[in-house]
Image (tube, rainbow, N blue to C red):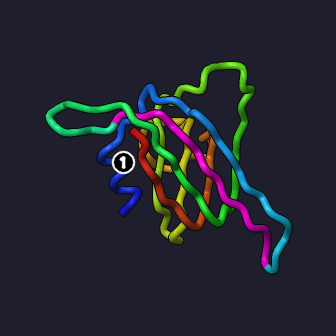
Amino acid sequence: MHVQEINSKYIFTDGEIISFKVNYRVPVKGGFIASARVSVKARHALGDEAFEYCTLILNFSGIRSLNISEDFTSEAKISDMTLKKLDDGSFYISLHPFNTTNEPNENDNFVIKADGFTFDMER
């Protein structure tokens, strides 16, 4: 599972948001078509306390909601990340979570909720 792999093999503390792109298309029956692609710097855990720096491309499809409140004047550092598959089958990510419980919180920032999630790693 993508969520378990990300949460167990990658370290986002002191990572960085490199880019954020949203594709938003005209209305279709039942809503809009939207997807997002987020590039982040992270550390890939290799075992025995060894890691390598990498860039992860997080891909979201079927965007349900975006909640971003940024002034874009400070660095794009990531202090932590919350990524979870919710009970309804959708995915939740916060790149600026309110706490470190890995549970969604109403005070989280840089939040994406989507029907689909995949990721790719660039070295």
Q: Residue at x 36, y 36 (%)?
A: 11
Residue 53 place in picture, x, y as percent: 36, 31
| Crowdedness near tag 1: few (<14), some (14–19) or many (≥20) residues, C-alpha within 10 Å | some
Quarter of the figure with the N terminus: bottom left
In this view, the residue farthest toward the bottom is 29
**SS of the residue under disc 1:** helix
Quarter of the figure with the C terminus: top left
Q: Is residue 21 above or below residue 49?
A: below
38 displayed left or right of 120: right
Name the amino acid, label 1.
Asn
Q: Residue at x 79, y 72 (%)?
A: 31
Q: Residue at x 46, y 29 (%)?
A: 15
Q: Which residue is mark 1?
A: 7
Q: Is residue 68 magenta?
A: no
Q: Which residues are magenta?
A: 30-43
78 displayed left or right of 54: right
